[in-house]
Amino acid sequence: MYTAKQLLAEAIGTFFLCFAGIAAIVSTAEPINSGAGLLGIALAHGLALSVAVSIFAGVSGAHFNPAVTIGFLSTGRIAPPLALLYIVAQLVGATLAAAACKAIFPADAVDAAQLGIPLPNVWVTVPILLLTEFILTFLLMTAIFGTAVDNRAVSMKLGGFGIGLTVAFDILAGGAVTGASMNPARSFGPALVHGNFDYHGYYWLAPIAGAVAAALLYHFVLLEKESTT
């Protein structure tokens, strides 16, 4: 029963993030043209994630991202079977969010914005895409460890705030380069619903590599080890 609650929390939390983010992106396209721009898109993602983490951290740990789950898996913080179920729940939540946005917004805006699929700018090469998504996700996973895993900071209860802000500044920094996905589920949902899987594999590879690198670095180097005496 508890596992079912964890999976539901992961699905709903991922829906929070993806619905807000996709809706903000589609709203900037014609004929809606909300004028929110990259700042509005960054705030939508960051605020939604901050709220979702604050709500569900005590239920599932608030991963909402296959790369984060795999990062935790690499340091033994989640068992492989549960990690797989988490990822499935995250993909379901992201897909439902994308489907909801497609149903809500005009088809012209959905098409113009590609349903908010994170995609590289026209001048971006594959190496730049991989490097950018690696760095952005590395920063995100570092923020997760630093605010929500490290016992030296957990008592300050800054997890939702710090993680949401990191996603916001990552989008401000990299949104014009790669779309600043940092999250395979965030890429998968709209790609599946809109039927565009261009560059999709890279949006799994780079975030997972960045999350695992950050997780291992924090776990083995920065995390204070418990005394055995």
Image (cartoon, rainbow, N blue to C red):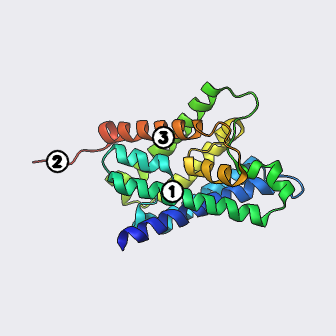
Of 168 and 152, nearer the camera is 168
Say which amino acid is labelled 2: Ser
* Label disc, if present, on residue 64 of the rendered structure: 1
Whether residue 153 can be seen here: no
Q: Residue furthest front?
A: 195
Q: Please state if 152 lies on the left or on the right of 6 as rendered.
A: left
Q: Residue furthest bottom?
A: 1
Task: Count neighbours of disc 2 (C-alpha within 10 A) and say few if under 14, some if 14 to 19, many if 20 or more.
Answer: few
Q: Return the residue at label 2.
A: 227
Q: CA distance from mark 1 to mark 2?
A: 32 Å
Q: Which quarter shows the N terminus?
A: bottom left
Residue 68 location (% of width, % of height): 46, 48
Say which amino acid is labelled 1: Phe
Q: Secondary structure at mark 1?
A: loop
Residue 77 location (% of width, % of height): 32, 51
Q: What residue is rendered at 58% in x and 35% in y?
A: 202
Q: Measured along the vertical axis of the image, is residue 161 above or below residue 134?
A: below
Q: Secondary structure at mark 2?
A: loop
Say which quarter of the image contains residue 85.
bottom left
Q: Return the residue at label 3.
A: 208
Task: Count neighbours of disc 1 (C-alpha within 10 A) and say few if under 14, some if 14 to 19, many if 20 or more.
Answer: many
Q: Nearer the viewer, mark 1 or mark 2?
A: 1
Q: What residue is rendered at 40% in x and 48% in y?
A: 145
| Earlier-in-chain disc, 1 versus 2 | 1
Q: Secondary structure at mark 3?
A: helix
